[in-house]
Image (cartoon, rainbow, N blue to C red):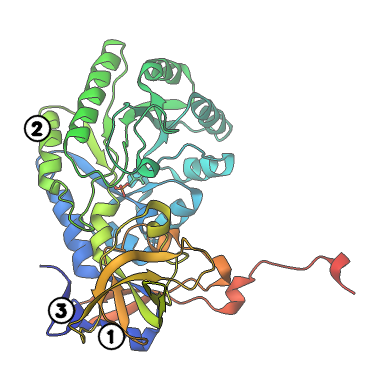
Amino acid sequence: MHHFQYRGNEMYCEDVPIQIIAQKVGTPFYLYSHATLKRHFSAFNDAFDGINRLVCFSAKANSNIAVLKLFANLGGGLDIVSGGELFRGLKAGILPDRIVYSGVGKSVDEIDYALKTGILMFNVESIEELELINKRASLLNLKAPVAIRVNPNIDSKTHPYISTGLKKNKFGIDYKTVIEGYKLAGRLENIEVIGIDCHIGSQIIEAQPFEDALKSIKRLIDELKDLGIEIRYLDMGGGLGITYDDESPPHPGEYARPIVNALESSHLQLILEPGRVIVGNAGILVTRVLYRKSGRGKEFIVTDAGMNDLMRPTLYNAFHAIKPVVKTKERLITADIVGPICESGDFLAVNREISDVKNGDFLAVMSAGAYGFTMSSNYCSRLRIPEVMVKDDLFYVVRARQEYEDLIAGESTPPFLEN
Ligand SMILES: *Cc1c(COP(=O)(O)O)cnc(C)c1O
């Protein structure tokens, strides 16, 4: 059951007419379905039944603390890539020993924060980082639990900006150097080697790249064992894709099967870092048509949401289905759906067939629950928009719309400018 459905001509989120929320909260805003978030998390987690696993939701896909709290309540962990995400996770009640920390550029402060928090493990992405973590842990008189992130050189056949498992990508340590990395880690006083990690990209819509990655990681685990290095945690990263348009990604069950088969008879504890697959289709962006205009042979629909609110179309040429919140017109037009920002790249859709909407109409930009709000910015001094969560017939604003004062918080004018 999909939780953004038309009843008659009107789109609902669970049991709430979206139009009602739009009138109360104003537009634009992000809207999340509690039931969908919960179902997606559980379906993903249940797909690994029979093996020891921890689903560490990838915070950067959607880091609203209400969303994180829901996953915490379901027993989830968190995959973080910054100190800010660690802060959010803790605020939301994610247990420290369920947090894994990835990313190529962890700073000293961030490393210290994670060490003091006592996270499950650092996914280390370079030899220098490994040495720095050892040094920081030594100063704090702690032992840092680490996995090394392997770059298995696998083509995940996704958009180049979100492919991460090729040797030309900045992520992980290349397959050849990994063994050296583990040998070094074994010698470092304040490092405790516990895991191995890979994450090959995002919006991956085939099963094969994951299976290839699993095979190459398993091979490494065996090689390490021969060297006397025991791996306890196998982190398979995230990356499972969703349907935005007509993609047909593997179902979580299909994605899980080879992993479950490979690990059933081992003592390895599995860690997963899904982001998009959990939240992507559990959220939409609701926007209002401000103006219609016609250019030379071109129709434009100008909306109150722009690239600063939803960057994916601009950044990746990503497709998002766009539907009227209330269906009124049968007639279809082909139009560019564009935002208010002074950039030609500011669009939600180009040459899109859409019903002949008029100013004031609400539009639902579908599949916007992942990398939507989290990638938004204040560009053009636009206020960051609210996030709303629906449960059954209730809605709750889980992040308020910013106000103008928020825009200049922390700014000041130096004395030499005063006259
Ligand atoms: C972004 C990211 C994820 C989540 O990717 P999805 O495609 O959203 O599942 C998981 N792990 C790491 C290290 C990431 O950077």
Q: Residue furthest front?
A: 296
Residue topped by disc 3: 6
Vertical arrangement, residue 167 with respect to residue 256, above or below = above
Answer whether labels 3 and 1 touch (C-beta < 8 Å): no
- The three-letter code of the residue at mark 3 reads Tyr
Residue topped by disc 1: 19
Residue count near mark 2 (Cα–Cα under 10 Å), binned few <14, some 14–19, many ≥20: few
Residue 323 appearing in the image:
no
Front residue of this view, candidates 58 and 132: 58
The mark lying in front, picked from 2 and 1, is: 1
Residue 323 point in image, percent of width and height: 24, 74
Dot 1 falls on a residue whose secondary structure is helix
Residue topped by disc 2: 261
Is residue 319 left or right of 122 when viewed as pictured? left
> Does the closest atom of ligand 1 sit within 8 Å of the Cβ of label 1?
no
Which label's residue is closer to the chain start, 2 or 3? Answer: 3
The mark lying in front, picked from 2 and 3, is: 3
Vertical arrangement, residue 163 with respect to residue 128, above or below = below
Residue count near mark 1 (Cα–Cα under 10 Å), binned few <14, some 14–19, many ≥20: many
- The three-letter code of the residue at mark 2 reads Asn
Dot 3 falls on a residue whose secondary structure is strand
Which residue sits at x=49%, y=33%?
A: 142
Residue 76 point in image, percent of width and height: 27, 52
Q: Residue furthest right?
A: 419
The quarter of the displayed image where residue 71 is located: bottom left
